[in-house]
Image: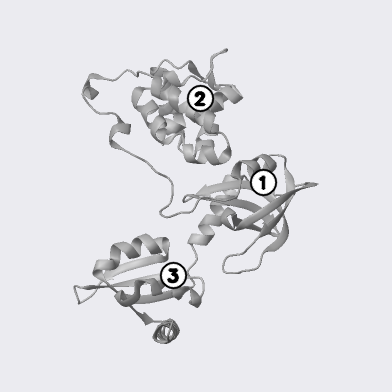
Amino acid sequence: MRPQRLLAILVALQANRRMTAADLAEQFGVSTRTILRDIDALAAADVPVVTERGRYGGIALLPGAEVDVSRLTGSEAEVLELIGVDLARARQLGIEAAARSATQKLSARKPWRPKSDAGLLTLSDVVAIDNSGWFEPDTEIDVSALARDLRRGKRLRIDYRPSGERAWRERVVDPYGLLSRGSRWYLIADAEGATRMYALTRLRSWTLLDEDRSIRADVTLEEVAASLVGALEGRGGVRVTALLDATTEDLARRILGKRLLSVEPTSDADQVRIVVGYDHLDGVRQLMQFTDHIEVVDPPQARQLIGRLAAEITRRHNAPA
């Protein structure tokens, strides 16, 4: 978002003193024209940023200038105050005090507002953001302690339970760092020649080793994490077609997420046809939670599996408890 990018541009210029528009555009994933508009916006807000043309030109902060969030406009500071500080994540990382201090400094500002905004409520008055997941248990692992150890750049020996398994396994990994996504924390690390994502909810313990980590030097943590997430969400070798009660469509969208590949109307106004993607046929078990609201129609193997599962559930519940 632009307010965050403006502040990030100031931080980048303070760290590097001089950068080209092309460098900034590449860093923030926008066009050079967008960067130049951002620089114009900063200059209009009296931020001491200058542009110089020529072979040795570029964009720079004036000597002695420091990043000062008080120079952001009222709306920019408001957005930063609302979404820029996640206190829950800061608490897990052990930096809640600093996060609260930053929030209070932003809140204490009395930003100038144009006359057109007179009488409007603030953004935080009408928008509430909660990044925690529904019915999510608290992460038992000490995220802040793990983050401190990761900053040492060493290998880890972890005690981890893979999804769907009961046994804990010990393995040595070369960590890139931590990823927070969808209210959950993950350790991103290389292990046995592949980059993997380990959910902290299934990480029982870890040991810091004396050996330096050995990771790919040509990629960043963000790039590795994005690649893993993209690969995970892009799977779907098995496509399951089912008829679903139309009243359950909203629930299906929430539960299935990106696994829900399509939703189409049928000749029956009370039903929709859905297509769901899974890595393996066994993934169709997820659809059992829709109980009598769903009928799997294709492929035949998925329909047969649902039939066997339903028969087993019926057998168990017909037996005396």
Q: Residue at x 47, y 49 (%)?
A: 183
Residue 198's quadrant in the figure? bottom right
| Local SS, label 2 | helix
Residue furthest to the top: 64
Residue 95's quadrant in the figure? top right
Q: Position of residue 157 (x, y in %)?
A: 73, 54
Q: Residue at x 52, y 55 (%)?
A: 229
Residue type at mark 3 is Gly
| Local SS, label 3 | strand
Query: Residue tagged by mark 3?
Result: 277
Distance from the alpha carbon under mark 2 to that under mark 3: 43 Å
In this view, the residue in front, 236 or 286, is: 286
Q: Of circles 2 and 3, which is in front?
A: 3
Q: Residue at x 51, y 25 (%)?
A: 10
Query: Residue tagged by mark 1?
Result: 218
Total number of numbered discs in the rendering? 3
Query: Residue tagged by mark 2?
Result: 10
Q: Residue at x 45, y 75 (%)?
A: 285
